[in-house]
């Protein structure tokens, strides 16, 4: 464990996805890209992490990684593991860089890329896939990796330890279940706003035939278009499969309530990002309205752009969400995700992580597996998002079977990209961009 | 008005302030710096704007300005004024760059620098200082500059128009008052955490002699040190002058309540940033506790790192603040500040803008003058923060007299830096940094 991080390499990797309409929603339309970080070590494996971005601007998160890299370069893994919150805060509470967030946006996403690369290195050194590495850590070590600053009014270290200790009960049974069945999942590949009706119908039919029983569509276009597309999908999947909707923040609070009144016809399972991501009180109002409107059959989901644990804390305290959608690399990496999983467990809200983009599926399968094994301890209402994009660029890509994720087995966080993909898609000098 | 913006120049300007302990608080300790933007035009004046940063990382906001600049370059001022929200959203809702915020942190600060530079240009073309330019705009033009997206549950365009129309009543009297007396102000120069007790005492005595009757100290160190320093200041200024406290987010929610229980002894006028800036619900709890603790004599203030109008909306809706501290250039420039001033007026909360750093005093004097003339229409509880740092680098620096700001008269937003200061302090190649 005396491995030392000797260098931090940053790559601006972008995939030209915008032209195909993949990933188009009410707000975003971009070239999926990643600020990809490699930690070189003196004789150990290479740690890989990244934050997902949306094309233009990836050079900004790359600049932020460079600005933070001196907190990582030269450290040994042993030092970091001995006092992980001191390490985490060296990035998050940097006395000059904190002003640029604080703990949000570009600077926090860059922190997430670096912190996750360190965790990838830790798991590789332990020779375990991340989900197993986390699930097998002693309770006190897990708790020592959480920064409780600003969340003690929702979760104390003792409460976190109690959740993690309880998570040892039945762990072997849950592990056997996961290894046999994989992780429940849903697909977002059927209903992007950029797709015509025929394509939506054909993709829905295909996904259903492949075994998917939960599908998410984008809403937030003209309300009559949203309803027409929703009816197409519901007609294809029948009354029992789950239909989720994602408005990508485009609605105002009252508009969200009005539009969900109409869309309730197709029995949505959740409405995701019904309004601005920062609007905790707005989400709470929408949640109360949607619950009343559907007798509790529909819930509010959000989190893919929730900036940090303080926003998630409030979403839980205000009863604003029925599903928490953490993102693996918008927040400050696994240290902060741990805080969020633990708060969700305390408040009894299931976590269905945000995925898609590039590499997010690779990341979050580990989080959901760990959550089931040690924190939330249930698969009830838990699903990992799945989008069939860009997995071919990863050394250890996700695998699905019959609408479920197959547990990864290679050591690390599944974050390593193929060198040839980095070379091909590096911006602006890779062959794909020249 | 057919002036066209032909070029966008960005300068990374940093002042070596960290060594002196100026600006040190519970969280930040940096070299005050600015991402400084100049808009070149075809024959018109140069528009100047900036966002304030804290030293390292200023290159990141500069990169963000470059990523957004194509939305500004090539536009005419007439086009922008004809449909200002379309222009504003071209930056804020860029389909690829929005992911990096959304509307927060680096990308939003860069937006603020660019948007303010456009406003500086508009006011210069009109030949008026910004406060007068804004105060004399017709109500419908002011309303047309506000993006109501995501705030209609707190403020509608009709409500905004009614506030601004009412703001015409008595405007001439208020203008005469401002021109005679200037703007009420308070000083933050007395109590930085980096200063020893003797320096705090001497600076407080000096400020009092200069006419200041409201002073702000930093808290968030060891509680006994905070109380000792507070007693020194209170002893110097007597029972009638106002003593404000600023914790710069260092406390957890319950910790803030505990510490204010002790600090109530010195009769603080407000506690600023008592906890994490994103914690609307936490601020609301602290506000209830502090109100009860002091019989309403002390209130909660926050805003200098509040990301956007959606956070301010919630702080008002939750009754979490008794003072709103907008920042001129962390949010998306004047368009967003207008929304915030109007919401504050509707909710009856006074606005005391954040200043200090570099150039923030130059900015916010215009906002408070406009707020008094046309929006809030009262000086009750309104004060502009004043810090005696770095004004010498501006073409039209703030002037104070007897603890009040003297109204600026030069056309524009007082944002233009001296060319020789830019040359001297440009990072990393200016003589000050070589």
Image (spheres, coloured by chain):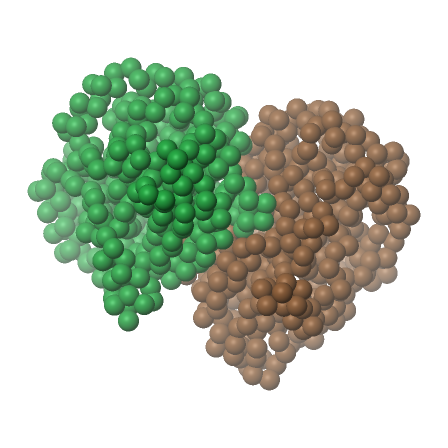
Chain colours: A brown, B green
Give residue B52's position: percent from left, percent from top: 35, 50
Considering every residue shown, the one lying at the far left of the view is B209
Q: Residue at x 35, y 57 (%)?
A: B11
Q: Which image quadrant is residue B2 in?
A: top left
Q: Residue at x 89, y 51 (%)?
A: A210
- The residue lying toward the viewer, choosing from B288 and B113, is B113
Considering every residue shown, the one lying at the far bottom of the view is A43
| Quadrant into which the N terminus of chain B falls | top left
- The residue lying toward the viewer, choosing from B86 and A417, is B86
Give residue A36's position: percent from left, percent from top: 60, 65
Q: Which image quadrant is residue B420 in?
A: bottom left
The relative height of residue B57 versus residue B171 in the rendered view (above or below) is below
Q: Residue at x 70, y 63 (%)?
A: A131
Left or right of residue A283: residue B303:
left
Considering every residue shown, the one lying at the far right of the view is A209
Give residue B124's position: percent from left, percent from top: 29, 37
- The residue lying toward the viewer, choosing from A23 and A261, is A23
The relative height of residue A211 versus residue A259 in the rendered view (above or below) is below
| Quadrant into which the C terminus of chain B falls | bottom left
Residue A137 visible in the snapshot: no
Residue B34 visible in the snapshot: yes
Q: Residue at x 32, y 45 (%)?
A: B46
- The residue lying toward the viewer, choosing from B62 and A360, is B62
Q: How many marks?
A: 0
Give residue A42's position: percent from left, percent from top: 56, 83
Left or right of residue B375: residue B392:
left
The relative height of residue A140 versus residue A264 in the rendered view (above or below) is below
């Amino acid at each position: 464990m005396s491995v030392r991080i000797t260098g931090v390499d940053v790559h601006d990797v972008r995939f030209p996805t915008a032209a195909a309409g993949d990933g188009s929603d009410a707000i975003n339309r971009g070239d999926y890209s990643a600020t990809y970080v490699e930690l070189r070590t003196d004789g150990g494996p290479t740690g890989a992490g990244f934050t997902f971005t949306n094309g233009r601007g990836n050079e900004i998160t790359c600049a932020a990684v460079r600005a933070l890299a001196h907190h990582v370069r030269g450290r040994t893994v042993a030092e970091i593991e001995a006092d992980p919150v001191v390490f985490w805060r060296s990035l998050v509470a940097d006395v000059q860089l904190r002003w640029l967030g604080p703990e949000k946006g570009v600077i926090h996403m860059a922190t997430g890329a670096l912190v996750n690369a360190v965790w990838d290195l830790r798991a590789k050194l332990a020779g375990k896939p991340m989900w197993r590495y986390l699930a097998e850590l002693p309770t006190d070590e897990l708790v020592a990796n959480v920064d409780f600053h600003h969340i003690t009014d929702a979760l104390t270290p003792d409460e976190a330890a109690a959740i993690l200790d309880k998570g040892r009960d039945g762990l072997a049974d849950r592990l056997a279940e996961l290894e046999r069945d994989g992780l429940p999942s849903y697909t977002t590949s059927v209903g992007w706003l950029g797709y015509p009706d025929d394509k939506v119908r054909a993709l829905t039919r295909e996904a259903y035939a492949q075994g998917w029983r939960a599908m998410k569509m984008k809403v937030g276009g003209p309300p009559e278009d949203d309803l027409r597309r929703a009816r197409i999908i519901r007609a294809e999947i029948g009354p029992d499969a789950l239909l989720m909707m994602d408005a990508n923040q485009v609605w105002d609070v009252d508009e969200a309530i009005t539009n969900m009144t109409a869309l309730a016809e197709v029995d949505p399972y959740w409405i995701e990002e019904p309004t601005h991501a920062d609007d905790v009180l707005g989400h709470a109002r929408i949640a109360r309205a949607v619950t009343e409107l559907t007798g509790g059959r529909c819930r509010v989901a959000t989190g893919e752009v929730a900036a940090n644990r303080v926003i998630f804390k409030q979403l839980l305290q205000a009863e604003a969400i029925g599903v928490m959608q953490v993102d693996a690399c918008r927040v400050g990496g696994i240290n902060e995700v741990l805080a969020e999983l633990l708060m969700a467990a305390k408040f009894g809200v299931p976590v269905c992580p945000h995925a898609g983009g590039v590499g997010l599926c690779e990341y979050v399968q580990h989080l959901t597996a760990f959550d089931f094994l040690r924190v939330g301890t249930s698969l009830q209402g838990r699903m990992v998002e799945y989008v069939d994009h860009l997995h071919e660029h990863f050394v250890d890509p996700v695998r699905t079977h019959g609408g479920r994720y197959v547990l990864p087995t290679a050591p690390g966080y599944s974050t390593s990209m193929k060198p040839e993909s980095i070379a091909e898609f590096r911006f602006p000098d890779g062959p794909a961009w020249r």
